[in-house]
Image: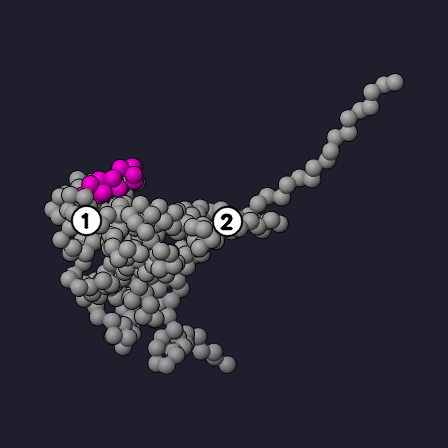
Amino acid sequence: MATDTRQARPATVAGRDCGAHPAPGAENPTWGYVRIQGELRRLGHRVAAATIRRVLRRSGLPPAPQRASQQTWRSFLRAQAHTLLACDFMHVETVFLKRLYVFFAMEIATRRVHILGVTPRPTGAWVAQLARNLLMDLEERAGCFRFLIRDRDSKFTATFDAVFAGNGTAVIPTPPQSPRPNAFAERWIRTARTECTDRLLITGERHLRTVLTRYAEHYNAGRAHRSLGLHAPDDDPGIIPLPAATVRRKQVLGGLLNEYHTMSPRPPHHSQETPSSAA
């Protein structure tokens, strides 16, 4: 009795070949049909380019040239996070109804925040000098940042942009009246107000500078971030802390914030007996 040795067609699910899935095309906008076909073949799936084209069209994904030109701002930030800086102003009202302005910068990849200055009357020259101070504080790491995101405030003058241009950092102004492109800085402003400044009575410029400097230290070293896998910006992700028998609480800003640190157990103390003198 003769047996049929022909290979059966790949099984389909809802009219779609199991090997052809729109994810490679959606996750890689520059990949064409043949490139996706090659990647699938390396994974053990033999799918025709026509099938890939049909699946992508059914999912609403255009050909590679059109997909590559449709890069969103979110995907740009995600791809360039390690080379991005963001800066912005926040304002705080004192108990004497005086408004103070805080200029800060954030490293997008690590979420590390730098409090650059506090003043009641910010000027273009003041902001430009703080930009120079930031690059000096970053030292060798300053060359790693290729882009700076800022809004279109008039205090960001041509001198300010020239400071970063000399470092090889391109300045990207956000569209007018669009806070979302600078969402990381805007989010930090909300966090700082919720956790710190809205819960304190600020008396003046010096007081606000001290409070925010201490809060930035807590934010960078003692606060877990969901976007960083529940690590703090200054944590070493390669180090896994071991459970400790002793946990000590450290109060920050007069008990407004709490930090918890593990303490290594102390060895038991044995009192040494002094030998008695010979009779």
Residues 210 and 142: in front is: 210
For the point 31% across and 45% down, the residue is 206
Is residue 44 toward the left or the right of residue 48 in the image? right
> Can residue 249 be seen at all in this image of the molecule?
yes
Q: Amino acid at mark 1?
A: Pro
Q: Which mark is residue 250?
A: 2
Residue 74, given in percent of the width and then of the height, sits at 27, 62
Residues in magenta, as a range: 128-140
Disc count in the image? 2
Please state if 45 lies on the left or on the right of 25 as rendered.
right
Quadrant location of the C terminus in the rendered image: top right
Q: Mark 1 sits on what residue?
A: 122
Label 2 CA crowd tier, 10 Å (few <14, some 14–19, many 20+): few
The quarter holding residue 44 reads bottom left
Can residue 31 be seen here? no
Q: Secondary structure at mark 1?
A: loop
Residue at far top of view: 279
The amino acid type, in three-letter code, at marker 2 is Lys
Asked if the stretch drawn in magenta spans residue 12, the answer is no
Left or right: residue 48 versus residue 122 is: right
Left or right of 171? Residue 49 is right
Secondary structure mostly seen in the magenta stretch: helix
